[in-house]
Amino acid sequence: MSDPQVSFQYEPTKQDRIMGRPNANGFRGLSPFLAVMPPSSYLVHGNSEILILDQHKKNVASHYDTLRYMRTWTLACGPGYTPIGPIYNWDLDTQGNGPSWIDIPGAKLGSPEEWREEREMLEFFVMADGHPELGSLYFFVIVSLKPGHYHVEMSSALYGNTGDASPPGNTREPWAKESGCKIPVDSGWLKVPILPQSFRRK
């Protein structure tokens, strides 16, 4: 059972959260869903934060380490969640790295004119490390590409309170449809802008 004194709150957002993120690795934001590391490395990403709220609605997430599992899918282009290509199992994405509740999940890519038409889903199962009593979160991010254009979709979260510290079993298709999660953040199709001169400086 989950702890009634503390609760998870997942917040996908259109606000760029790349500043100061360890997984930014030198990328600089071009737009809320796009970052670049000159001369030709791009990151198409979502933006999210997980809050852990105490009984007074104060965010105490910094007091808890993150336990996050992830698996990836290549989806058929267009609507829906039909997988194509390899089937991957859940992998432990972070453990022993302290609190990591702000994230920019996405895909690192080369030059935009070389992007192929494709669609990738990242699924996440998240808990507070060592505190299964706080429950769990499931959510997903979809990055779609075509030459010179990108599209990011971020789901709502499915909350669990089973106390199980492991993600549900591996399956042959994503849980996205079964979860009932909606898409509250949808960038729509966006065109990669011309790189500003200031970003071209080394």
Image (tube, rainbow, N blue to C red):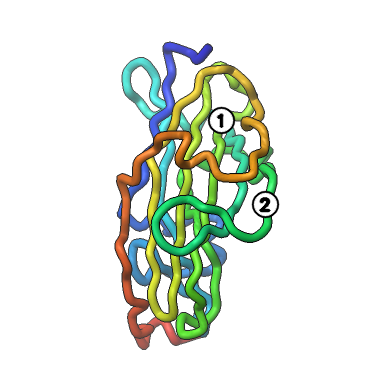
Picture quadrant where residue 11 is located: top left
Q: Earlier in the sequence, mark 1 or mark 2?
A: 2
- Taking 117 as reference, is 3 above or below it? above
Q: Nearer the viewer, mark 1 or mark 2?
A: 2
- Taking 105 as reference, is 6 above or below it? above
Whether the residues at callouts 1 and 2 have beta carbons within 8 Å, the answer is no
Numbered disc 1: secondary structure: strand
In the rendered structure, the answer to whether residue 69 lies left or right of residue 186 reads right
Return the residue nearer the eye: 118 or 115.
Answer: 118
Task: Identify residue type, mark 1.
Answer: Met
Picture quadrant where residue 132 is located: top right
Task: Identify residue type, mark 2.
Answer: Ile
**Which residue bears the numbered disc 2?**
87
Return the residue nearer the eye: 181 or 37.
Answer: 181
- Taking 167 as reference, is 109 above or below it? below
In the rendered structure, the answer to whether residue 94 lies left or right of residue 174 reads right
**Mark 1 and mark 2: Cα distance apart in space:** 23 Å
Residue drawn at x 34%, y 46% as measured from the top left = 183
- Taking 25 as reference, is 12 above or below it? above
Residue drawn at x 31%, y 55% as measured from the top left = 186
**Which residue bears the numbered disc 1?**
127
